[in-house]
Image (tube, grey):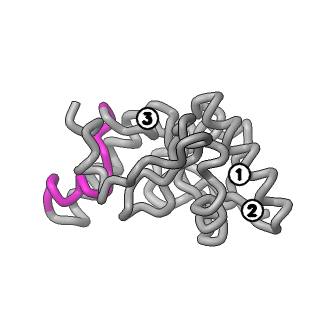
Amino acid sequence: MLRVPHPGALGEAHGAVFVGTTVFDDGVPAVANLDPAFLGALRRAAEDAAGDGIDFVVNSGWRSPAYQDQLLREAVVKHGSEEEAARWVATAETSAHVAGGAVDIGPPAARAWLSVHGAGYGLCQIYENEPWHYELRPDAVVNGCPPMYPDPSQDPRMRQ
């Protein structure tokens, strides 16, 4: 497989991933630095999804604070203000990615599979505007996923 890095990234050591990275790529810091319970849930889900012909791709996982800061700066430029950028990218201090507790999953078929089956693994979409962003919510196994926030700017964790 051709390993092409996502554009603009600081590098793999900071959490950048190559196209085609999976939840089983232990040598990739974006995967290896995920919270162990979260990674275990992702791997169980990916194994079951593979039985349905669905492959999970990690488009982003753990990120260094420097990489998160870079993504936020790029979002400010793209969206025109810090307020608008906050709807898409958290600060390094508040990002679940920096803490190893978030992953952006692709392709669309994997996200569709997770939207149906993810709660059974404790994997929940957190933001309505980010269908790719999943975090571990262990209570979801019994209670289902909690209501989503419209976007990260509405998440109380982002106001720390």
Give the percent coordinates (x, y) of residue 50: 81, 60
Task: Between residue 77 and residue 58, name the one nearer to us.
Answer: 58
Residue at figure coordinates x 64%, y 30% from the top left: 37
Rendered position, 12 above or below 75: above
The residue indicated by pointer 2 is 55
Nearer the observer: mark 1 or 2; the answer is 2
Callout 1 amino acid:
Thr
Answer few, some or many: residues within 10 Å of disc 2's Cα (few below 14, many 20 plus, some between 14 and 19): many
Residue drawn at x 30%, y 59% as measured from the top left: 150
Mark 3 crowd level (few <14, some 14–19, many ≥20, 10 Å Cα): many
Kind of residue at disc 2: Asp
Disc 1/disc 2 C-alpha distance (Å): 8 Å
Helix, strand, or loop for circle 2?
loop
Q: What element carries label 1?
A: loop
Q: In this view, does 77 lie to the left or right of 113?
A: left
Q: Mark 3 points at which residue?
A: 98
Secondary structure of the magenta portion, mostly? Answer: loop
Which amino acid type is shown beneath numbered disc 3?
Answer: Val
Q: In this rendering, would 123 be left or right of 76? A: right
Q: Quadrant of residue 80?
A: bottom left
Part of the protein shown in magenta: 81-93
